[in-house]
Image (tube, rainbow, N blue to C red):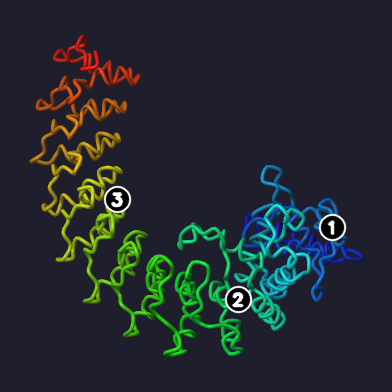
Amino acid sequence: MIGGLELGNAYSATIERIKAQDGDKSRLGMAALMWISYAERPLQADELCHALAVELGSTDFNFNNVPSLSILVSCCQGLITVDKEASTVRLIHSTLQEYLSAHPDMFSRPHSAMAEICLTYLSSQQVKALSTAPPSDTDNIPFLEYCSVYWGVHAKRELSDYARSLALNLCREHYGHISTKFLLAHVERLCCGYSRTFYPFSGLHCASFFGIVEVVSALIELGCYDINEEDFSGCTPLSWAAHNGNAEVVKILLARGEGVNLEKPDNNGRTPLSFACWNGQEGVVKLLLGREEVNPNKPDNNNRTPLWYAALNEHEVVMKVLLGRQEVNPDEPDNRGLTPLSCAAWNGHEVVVKILLEQEEVNPEKPDNRGQTPLSLAACDGHEGVVKALLLRGVADPDKPDDAGKTPLSYAAWYGHEGVVEILLGRGGINPDKPDNYGQTPLFLAARNGHEGVVKILLGREDVNPDKPDNYGRTPLSFAARAGHGGVAKILLGRLDVRPDRSDNNG
């Protein structure tokens, strides 16, 4: 710790002063330190004040209990401060967080306490009344978003009997609860696709989402829900547990035997295995693949297989697990013609590309529906490592055009990827002056987009015509000048074989 023993002693003394305060000040001060120290994200000032106003056991939120920020700061004896730019409350220094982390007995079961407070807030009459209300009506309950998104995170870490009871009550009344909207809006693009509504979404879906084993087990035993029930996106509780890697919940659901549908797809055709592969949940993937009824190569509505999703998101370990199954086709294209290799190459996943290139069934030249090969896609986005890996195999044609007549060099030049341009030009069998279907050469494409570095590289080749017109009679110089790329125009004018007086077909 910065400052060593002396600073630690100073923090200890200050905390003792906080505890020695009269009335409610001691409780407020210590509770504030707990929340700031253990919260899942920085808390806004009004969020923290509402958290400290919650009365456990009460079904109503008393706004009169909300402390002012000035009182709260005073109760903490200078150990907290307000970040004016972000409007968040934080500890006075990072060393205080180190001190509190080194003294875990400072607070009794903090995550359980925070889960109780979040659940009490969500169960208040004020929040329940907003179940179907628009977001604009939640301005006076600022703690709602945090409670909705993180109550289960805290409960999963520490679950008291009281928190379990509160969670069960919330889950039994979960249909239409406004917390669903905040929770699922927090999930990036939902991975389930866009939806106009987040309902229905049952309490079993919610508990499976968070992975709270005790609550999931209790809900199943109580018979509150159908374990194969679909939510708004067609996802089952198993799909959400698989998506979030909640292996223990998956085990509970799998233990239901024939009662659980392991292959039930969502509205987009994605199975629980697809979701687990999407997020790289190795443990869940192995659990699901251990069941005979699970098809490891089952495509969704876009013909994207579990392997496709693992390749997309760079989950190498999951990919190797899938590739160990004979049923898995490592070269299966989706509806756009993108294979796992194409997808990985386009996104620059070099390790994934190398894994797939080791598979005999993978065709490194397989084009998508636009005729673009993995090499073309990698060149388009400037992924030098992937380009090298594909060329190293010696089976990728570095000059193969797509349906628009553009070669990998054309795309690299078009987007200004100098490194890729140099790599491709270093290979034999490339025509650096090859026009596309519009008659536009790599030099033309670089000039039209103002990529001076690429223009210089291409002009260094004797087999590149710097004055070659496209199908409309436009030259690299005329197009660069028209687009306002003065630097490119100046470079081209430095060549004796460029005619500055040449006009295109438009005059």
Image quarter for residue 500?
top left
- Describe the element under mark 2 as helix, strand or loop: helix
- Per the model, the C-alpha gap separating discs 1 and 2 is 33 Å
Residue type indicated by callout 3: Trp
Image quarter for residue 491?
top left
For label 3, the residue is 346
Residue at (73% x, 71% y) in the render: 123
Q: Nearer the viewer, residue 464 or 36?
A: 464
Of the numbered discs 1 and 2, the one sitting upstream in the chain is 1
- Per the model, the C-alpha gap separating discs 3 and 2 is 39 Å
Q: Residues within 10 Å of mark 3 (few under 14, many from 20)?
A: many
Residue at (31% x, 28% y) in the render: 449
Q: Position of residue 452 (x, y in %)?
A: 29, 25
Residue at (81% x, 52% y) in the render: 69
- Describe the element under mark 1 as helix, strand or loop: loop
Q: Position of residue 253 (x, y in %)?
A: 48, 84
Q: Would residue 278 appear left or right of 92 to someone viewing this image?
A: left
Query: Please, which residue is most extreme toward the left here?
Result: 429
